[in-house]
Image (tube, helix red, strand yellow):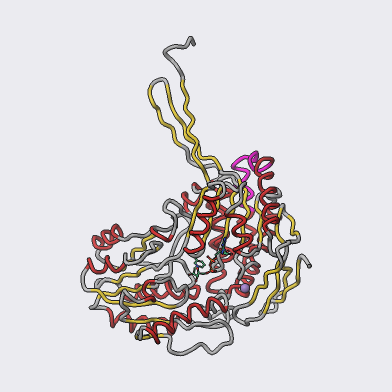
């Protein structure tokens, strides 16, 4: 099986797509069979990549361990930073092609979505490049004779498993923090979207990273993913994906070598609009929060909770705004802002929620009555109104462009509704009353709160979940997104001033 293939993209661009596993700065054969990757817009096969078997994972881990011990550990932090600065430049230089690969493979609108991912990845790369020589420590004076210093040391070899909704960007959130903190990495892409991360392997070589620092594998969750989570020589595993698989990862980590775990799982985020909100702004943000990336966002504000006095006005503005701004269609069309869902499986899963809402629960569909006329895996922006909290659509993560709406009359009711979920990833609140907005933020059970915006995370601020959206302390982005890849060592220093001769 070939290790690369010339691919012609829908806009005529030709490029060389690596297909092998990226281990030790080389593309090599995998022994776990092949993974076919499809375009969700055309529904056609793009190409097949090599899948990693458990033995391939083992090989990658050995290489990462050797790179950690022999090279990466001995490179000065600021020199690691220089490599990362170079990598950031290369992400920008290759932005167009990386964006186009995610556009064809994941169905992300190139102009209005995929390019943002690459820009964010480059910013994050610079942010962590600057952190390589600024990993914070702590000093404590115990008494005149003694002090303790605490250092943050890398774990060693980190295993990472990413989903398909942000194929390149999600991987950067994981790789960059880990290598900046001094670890080496074995990362697995999602089955639906292996292509951009393999291409990124080229940039690792070109930036001049020593072999084995970043190893990239394509592979099946059950085989390669579980080989990572249960590997005896991986010191930490970081995962983003469904809560169900997150729980399995934690079990495998415990059952093997008790490796450290960071999980970023699902969400069912609320967006609360008070009667004093700037409605136009709320509409813009709330629609972005549910229709950007076709709703395939872990922080998607899929529950919209409206004060009864602005409910009808909000919905009318929302409909008008969505009709003219959230344009469904071909990811390579520059006007398009909503692409297809990533796969047939995902489209069918989302459609089954819509059908359940309509046929079983008899919910009222306010938007999304017209099916999309295209052969790909499309779902139109869809909104159900007057949805009770007992509804399956209120409770479960749908991971598509489907929002449920309900009304409230009091502040307490709004807070109770917002927190009425097993998840706690993001929450948005719209109010121009500064006291109310901050008090509400304090009451929300979520790792991220947006006041008067939604889903506009920033690489400098931490990101992660309360409740079943994560495993508690785990955060990505910001300083915390680097510190999760470190462990703390306390060094006690006894000067013994009293007893010793100087
Ligand atoms: P998933 O959780 O199955 O897949 C995510 C990653 O985990 C992939 O790389 C996959 O290969 C890997 N994986 C799967 N099973 C594994 C296992 N047993 N051991 C180790 N790794 C394993 O997600 P999915 O099936 O692609 O999507 C299902 C649902 O998950 C979606 O509908 C959505 O609700 C949710 N989801 C959430 C996110 C998020 O960002 N929070 C991302 C993707 C999917
Ligand atoms: Mn694909």
Residue 57 in percent (x, y) is at: 67, 55
The residue depicted at 72 percent of the width and 70 percent of the height is: 15
The magenta stretch spans residue 85: yes
Residue 173 in percent (x, y) is at: 54, 57
Outermost residue, right direction?
2
Number of numbered tags placed on the structure image? 0
Query: In the image, 178: left or right of 288?
Result: right
Quarter, ligand 2: bottom right
Outermost residue, top direction?
501
The magenta stretch spans residue 96: no
The residue depicted at 49 percent of the width and 76 percent of the height is: 294
Report the quarter where the N terminus lies: bottom right
Answer with the quarter of the image where residue 142 lies: top left
Vertical side of 2 occupied by 180: above or below: above
The residue depicted at 78 percent of the width and 67 percent of the height is: 2
Residue 143 in percent (x, y) is at: 38, 23
Residue 465 in percent (x, y) is at: 42, 58
Vertical side of 293 occupied by 136: above or below: above
Magenta residues: mostly which secondary structure? helix
Query: In the image, 461: left or right of 211?
Result: left
Vertical side of 312 occupied by 70: above or below: above
Q: Nearer the viewer, residue 281 or 173?
A: 173
Q: Nearer the viewer, residue 42 or 128?
A: 42
Query: In the image, 466: left or right of 228?
Result: left
The magenta-colored residue range is 71-86
Q: Nearer the viewer, residue 22 or 202?
A: 22
């Amino acid at each position: 099986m070939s290790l690369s293939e010339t691919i012609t993209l829908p806009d005529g661009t030709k490029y060389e797509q690596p297909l092998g596993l990226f281990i030790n700065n080389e593309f090599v054969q995998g022994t776990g069979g092949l993974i076919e990757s499809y375009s969700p817009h055309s529904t056609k096969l793009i190409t097949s990549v090599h899948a990693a078997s458990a033995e391939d994972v083992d090989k990658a881990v050995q290489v990462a361990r050797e790179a950690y011990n022999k090279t990466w550990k001995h490179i000065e932090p600021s020199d690691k930073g220089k490599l990362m600065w170079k990598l950031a430049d290369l992400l920008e230089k290759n932005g167009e092609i990386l964006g186009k690969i995610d556009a064809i493979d994941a169905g992300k609108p190139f102009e209005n979505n995929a390019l943002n991912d690459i820009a964010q990845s480059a910013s994050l790369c610079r942010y962590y490049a600057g952190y390589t020589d600024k990993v914070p420590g702590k000093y404590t004076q115990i008494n005149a004779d003694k002090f303790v210093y605490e250092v943050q040391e890398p774990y060693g070899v980190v295993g990472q498993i990413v989903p398909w909704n942000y194929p390149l960007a999600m991987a950067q959130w994981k790789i960059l923090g880990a290598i900046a903190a001094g670890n080496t990495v074995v990362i697995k892409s999602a089955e639906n979207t292996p292509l951009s991360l393999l291409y990124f392997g080229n940039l690792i070589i070109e930036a001049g990273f020593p072999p084995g620092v970043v190893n990239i594998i394509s592979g099946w969750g059950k085989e390669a993913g579980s080989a990572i989570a249960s590997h005896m020589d991986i010191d930490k595993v970081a995962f983003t994906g469904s809560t169900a698989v997150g729980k399995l990862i934690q079990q495998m980590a415990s059952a093997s070598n008790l490796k450290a775990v960071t999980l970023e799982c699902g969400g069912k985020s609320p967006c609360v609009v008070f009667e004093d909100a700037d409605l136009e702004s709320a509409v813009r943000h709330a629609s972005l929060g549910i229709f950007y990336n076709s709703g395939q966002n872990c922080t998607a504000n899929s529950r919209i909770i409206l004060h009864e006095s602005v409910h009808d006005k909000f919905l009318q503005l929302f409909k008008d705004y969505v009709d003219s701004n959230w344009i469904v269609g071909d990811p390579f069309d520059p006007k398009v802002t909503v692409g297809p869902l990533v796969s047939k499986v995902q489209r069918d899963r989302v459609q089954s929620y819509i059908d359940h809402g309509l046929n079983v629960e008899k919910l009222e569909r306010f938007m999304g009555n017209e099916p999309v006329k295209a052969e790909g895996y499309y779902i139109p922006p869809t909104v159900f109104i007057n949805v009770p909290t007992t509804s399956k659509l209120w409770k479960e993560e749908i991971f598509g462009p489907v929002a449920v709406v309900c009304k409230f009359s009091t502040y307490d009711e709004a807070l109770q509704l917002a927190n009425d979920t097993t998840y706690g990833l993001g929450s948005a609140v719209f109010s121009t009353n500064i006291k109310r907005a901050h008090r509400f933020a304090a009451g929300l059970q979520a790792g991220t709160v947006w006041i008067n915006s939604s889903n506009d995370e920033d690489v400098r601020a931490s990101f992660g979940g309360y409740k079943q959206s994560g495993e508690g302390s785990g955060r990505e982005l910001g300083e915390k997104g680097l510190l999760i890849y470190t462990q703390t060592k306390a060094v006690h220093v006894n000067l013994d001033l009293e007893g010793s001769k100087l």
